[in-house]
Image (spheres, rainbow, N blue to C red):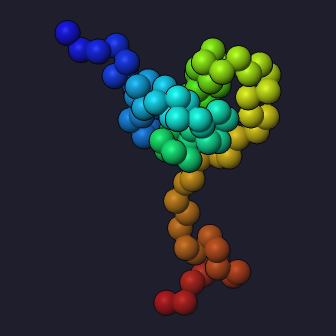
Amino acid sequence: MKDPRDVFICRCEEVTLREIEEAIEEGYTTVDDVKRITRAGMGLCQGRSCSKVIARLISEKTGIPLSDLLQTGYRYPVRPEKMMVLDNDGEGDE
């Protein structure tokens, strides 16, 4: 049987519960700390799927109030743009 701690918490970066718990045990006690060490929250969704779960895990393991751990804002996902959108006249140099 597979270990339940091997479940993905951050699906975008494939970070498991085990990796997040290990980071917290090593002393990383903010969402940003865990993000830097594990890459959880650095994928396409920018943490929209996993940040609250990570904050809850940190709160449970450290006793830090959940309200002190939650982020107030998020970055929008990166989307490719055509280079001609950046051109001032929109016609390009062909």
| 94 versus 42 height, above or below | below
Q: Position of residue 4 (x, y in %)?
A: 34, 13
Q: Position of residue 38 (x, y in %)?
A: 48, 41
For the point 37% across and 18% down, the residue is 5
Is any atom of residue 66 visible in this view?
no
- Label count reads 0
The quarter of the displayed image where residue 45 is located: top right
The quarter of the displayed image where residue 30 is located: top right
83 and 31: which is toward the camera: 31
Among all residues in the image, which is located at the extreme left?
1
Among all residues in the image, which is located at the extreme top?
1
Among all residues in the image, which is located at the extreme bottom?
94
Quarter of the image for the N terminus: give it. top left
7 and 30: which is toward the camera: 30
81 and 56: which is toward the camera: 56
For the point 74% across and 34% down, the residue is 71
For the point 73% across and 28% down, the residue is 69
Q: Position of residue 46 (x, y in %)?
A: 58, 41
For the point 79% across and 27% down, the residue is 68
67 and 82: which is toward the camera: 67
| 53 versus 88 height, above or below | above
Is any atom of residue 3 visible in this view?
yes
